[in-house]
Amino acid sequence: MNLPLLGVLLAGGENRRYGSHKALARVGGRSILDRGLASLAGVTERIGIVANDPAPYGPAGRPVRPDLRPGTGVLGGLLTAVEWAGDEGCEAAVVLACDMPFVPGGLLRRLAEEADPATVSVPASPGPRGLEPLCGVYGTRTAAAIAAALDRGDRAVISFFDAVEVRILALDEVHRFGAPERMFWNVNRPEDRATAEAWAVPPAAGDPTDSQREDEDA
């Protein structure tokens, strides 16, 4: 379906394990934040960031919104993203965690093809859940199920999946966009960033770095 979409980067965590704002850490010459925003920009021009501390993300030039329900973890951030999409007149939110530097825009575009106001579209993953919920498309009509899960104190990110239709992109199709183990790699600790750096492809010659972009925008 061709629906109006809001791209949302989830950056509301407390970064305890990383020790600083991990979205601002650099991988392959670019911040993880910049990488995520670039992937979302391949799907929609309308992009925002969910973060309880907006100051570090101001230079990104995107609107920042705090959690609607502070202290409710990733699921609270997801609810904020979906409600924000509705506020903007969109019918779904394309959601990406701020700590996954290798999710390609092509995968997000493929998931967006499955977008529906009442459904969730996520890629299959070889991980323990069998899917990756923080790289997905969430219809605005799933907000009630997310809120209900929070109301009953269940903060697991997939706690509401049994109350909505979930469309899972098959693993063989996910592989068309890259190795899932790399695409869904989480930078939670400094050593995770070191692994990501070893995998990263540096910016092509002539592609401005983040600092150069900021200088150009000044």
Image (cartoon, helix red, strand yellow):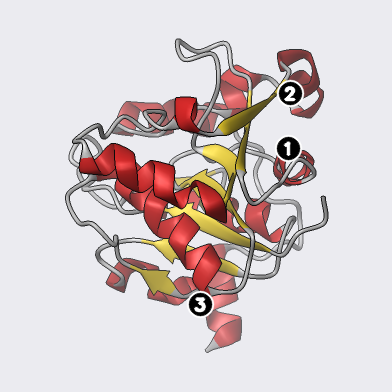
65 relative to 199, above or below = below
The quarter of the picture where residue 16 lies is: top left
Residue kind at label 3, given as amino acid type: Gly
63 relative to 80, above or below = below
Tell me residue 44's x, y (percent). Answer: 71, 63
Residue occupying image coordinates x 75% and y 51%: 204
Q: Which residue has dot 2 on it?
A: 174
Residue occupying image coordinates x 46% and y 75%: 63
Residue kind at label 1, given as amino acid type: Leu
Compare marks 2 and 3 and give the one earlier in the sequence. 3
Residue occupying image coordinates x 54% and y 41%: 101
Tag 2 and tag 1, C-beta contact below 8 Å: yes
Task: Check disc 3 and report its element: helix, strand or loop.
Answer: loop
Mark in the foreground, 3 or 1: 1
**Which label was assigned to residue 107?**
1
45 relative to 120, above or below = below
Would residue 204 be seen by someone viewing this image from the given angle?
Answer: yes
Q: Residues within 10 Å of mark 1 (few under 14, many from 20)?
A: many
Task: Check disc 1 and report its element: helix, strand or loop.
Answer: helix
Mark in the foreground, 2 or 3: 2
Task: Check disc 2 and report its element: helix, strand or loop.
Answer: helix
Q: CA distance from mark 3 to mark 1?
A: 24 Å
Q: Which residue has dot 3 on it?
A: 61
Tell me residue 109's x, y (percent). Answer: 76, 46
Say whether residue 88 is left or right of residue 154.
right
